[in-house]
Image (tube, helix red, strand yellow):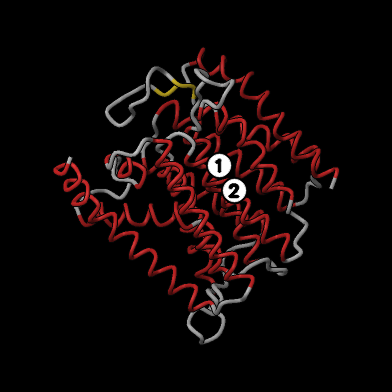
Amino acid sequence: MISETMTVFFAFLASYIAILMIKPLAIKVGLVDTPCSRKKHIGSIPLIGGLCIFVSVLVSVVMFFPLDKQIISYLVCAGAIVLLGVIDDYRQLGVRIRLSIQTLVALLMIWGSDIYIQNLGDLFLFGEIELSWFGIPFTIICVIAAINAFNMIDGIDGLAGSLSITTLISVFLLMLINGNFVFAALPLIIVATIMPYLAFNLGIKGHRNKKIFMGDAGSMFIGLSVIWFLMICTQSQDKTFRPVTALWIIAVPLMDMLAIIIRRIRKGQSPFSADRDHLHHIFMRLGFSSRRALRVIITFSLIMSTIGILGELVQVPEPIMLLLFILFFIGYSTCLQHCWKVARYLRRKR
C-alpha cells in the first residue's frame, strides 16, 4: 500500500514538473492553440497537457512496474499515438492520415498485448457471443472509436480529463472488487498525472493565467489507455468485469460520439467534420457557463459509471444491462435532437 501511494505521488509530481519544463519550450516552438471560429479562448494556449501526461506515465511505469510484454506494448502504442497527436496539434493532419496511423497502432496493440475483443458475453441469452476471426477488425474499430470519442468530446476546459478520471477510477474499483491487482495501480498513475493538468487547465487557485490545453495528443492517449484497460479487463483469462459493463463506464464519450456521427450522416455531412453540436456546446447555448456544463456532464458520467459498477456487483443479466444502455442512448440522442427547440423556447421567454 505504501509503495502504491509513493508511486501515485511520484506520478503526480512528475506530471507537475513536466508541465513547468515543457510549457516554455512549447511556446518557443509554436506548439500552441490560437483562437478561431470554433475556439473562443483568449490568446495562444500551449498544447502540452497530453505530452506531459504521457511522459510522466512513461517515467512512473518504467520506474515502478515490471516491464512485461503487455506493459511494453501499451507504452509503445501510447507513445505512437501521442506522437501522432503532437504532430496533429502542430500541423493539423488530414483525417485519412490520422485514421491510418490509428489503425496501425490498433494492430500493434493487438499483436503486442496478444489480446483482442473476441467475446462479447451473453447479451441475448443464447450463450457467449464469440467473434472468432472477426474479433480483430472489430477490435480495430473499437480502438479507433475510443481514441476519437475522447478526442471529439474535448471541447471545454476540464471535460476530457475529468471524464477520463471517472472512467479510470471505475476501472480501478472493479479491479479491486474482483481481485485483479496486477494492473490496479496503473489507472491511478494515469489519474495522478491528469490532476496537475486539470489544475492548470481549470485555473485552480495558484494556477490562474497559466492555462494549458490537453491537445489531440492528450485526448487520443486517454482514449487509447481506456480501451486498453477495457480489453485487458474483459478479454484476458482472468476477466475483471463483463464486456457490457465497459459500455457504462465509457458511456458519455461513446454516446456523444455516436449521436454526433448519426446526426452528421443524416445531414449528409462527413462523420469527421468539425462542428459545435456536442453535448457541452449545447449546454453552453442553453445559457450554462462552461463550469456548470462541466459539473452536469461529469455528474451524468458518474451516474452511468455507478449503474455499470452496481450492475456488475449484483450480476444483473447482461441482456438487461445492454437494453438499459440502448434505452439511455436513445433518450440521450433524442434529447440532443430536440434541445434546440427547448433553447429557442427559453430565448423567447427571456
Against 117, residue 269 (above or below) is above
**Amino acid, disc 1:** Phe
* Badge 2: residue crowd in 10 Å (few <14, some 14–19, many ≥20): many
Residue 150 percent across, percent down from the top left: 47, 46
Which residue position holds label 1?
221
Image disc number at residue 225: 2
C-beta proximity under 8 Å, tags 2 and 1: yes
In the displayed structure image, the side of residue 216 where residue 4 appears, left or right: right
Q: Residue furthest left?
A: 348
Q: Quadrant of the C terminus?
A: top left
**Amino acid, disc 2:** Ser
Against 71, residue 23 (above or below) is above
Q: Quadrant of residue 348?
A: top left
Residue 289 percent across, percent down from the top left: 36, 35
Residue 4 percent across, percent down from the top left: 80, 45
* Badge 1: residue crowd in 10 Å (few <14, some 14–19, many ≥20): many
| Residue 213 visible, this orientation | yes
Q: Nearer the viewer, residue 348 or 204?
A: 348
Image disc number at residue 12: none
Point 40% across, 69% down: residue: 326
Q: Residue furthest bottom?
A: 126
Badge 2 marks a residue whose secondary structure is helix
Badge 1 marks a residue whose secondary structure is helix
Q: Nearer the viewer, residue 185 or 84?
A: 185
Point 75% across, 35% down: residue: 9
In the displayed structure image, the side of residue 255 where residue 136 appears, left or right: right
Point 37% across, 24% down: residue: 41
